[in-house]
Image (cartoon, helix red, strand yellow):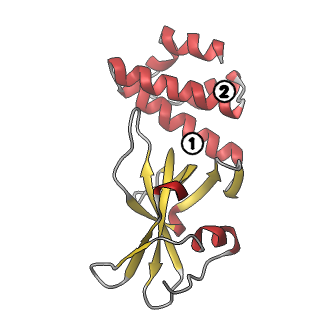
Amino acid sequence: MEKVLADRRYGVWARVPGTLRRGAAGLRDAVVWPAHEWREVDMQVVRRCGLERGFMAQVVGITVCRESRRLSGLLVRERLASNYQAMREIELDRIIGLRDLLYDRLMVGAHESIDRSLVRSMGEAAALGFGASRRCWIDALTRLVVRRKLAGRCVLEWLEDIEEGILLEDPDFTRHLRVA
């Protein structure tokens, strides 16, 4: 495999060896890493419609521009309530926050901004979910609060704007938040 040109912050990931998959359109190639190289990350991205969204994911590889050999995106598997989505590409210019969980290293953005978008996205998913799905999202949100040592007051402030204020009235959520 040819050398991949990347910014310093992504230099380590650009050097990870993997399986090269040629792109169908001929514009980009994908380098998929072996499973033991996958990285758990917290991400904050801008959707194509302009809205921000935070989620936990696994980075499973990179995409490279075929002509210039420059890093163009990350291949990620988004974590859902109880499993992972299929692998998809997220372009580097859409990533506004990225934190490597293995080393708790901030690569792009700010910790507070990433935390806020994660809490809001998980809160919206919990508010829209029912039954087991709702409990899974509440548990995931609680684990995030414990892992990041977030203040309960901040979490409640970030969740105030959710239109379905149902989550703040849910006894399961408030009990989990008190425990955290």
* Of 44 and 8, the residue lying toward us: 8
Earlier along the polypeptide chain: callout 2 or callout 1? 1
Question: Element type at marker 2?
Answer: helix
Residue at image coords 37%, 57%: 87
- How far across and down, in percent of the image, does residue 158 sit? 60, 32
- Taking the image as drawn, is residue 160 in sight? no
* Of 9 and 51, the residue lying toward us: 9
Q: Are marks 2 and 1 in contact (CB under 8 Å)?
A: no
The tag on residue 146 is 2
Residue projecting furthest to the left: 24
Question: Element type at marker 1?
Answer: helix
* Of 14 and 28, the residue lying toward us: 14
- How far across and down, in percent of the image, does residue 45 sit? 51, 55
Q: In the picture, residue 37 is in which quadrant?
A: bottom right
Residue at image coords 53%, 68%: 92
Residue at image coords 49%, 51%: 58
Residue designated by label 1: 117
* Of 97 and 22, the residue lying toward us: 22
- How far across and down, in percent of the image, does residue 155 sit? 63, 27
The tag on residue 106 is none
- Which amino acid does the dot numbered 2 rest on? Val
- Which amino acid does the dot numbered 1 rest on? Ser
Residue projecting furthest to the bottom: 67
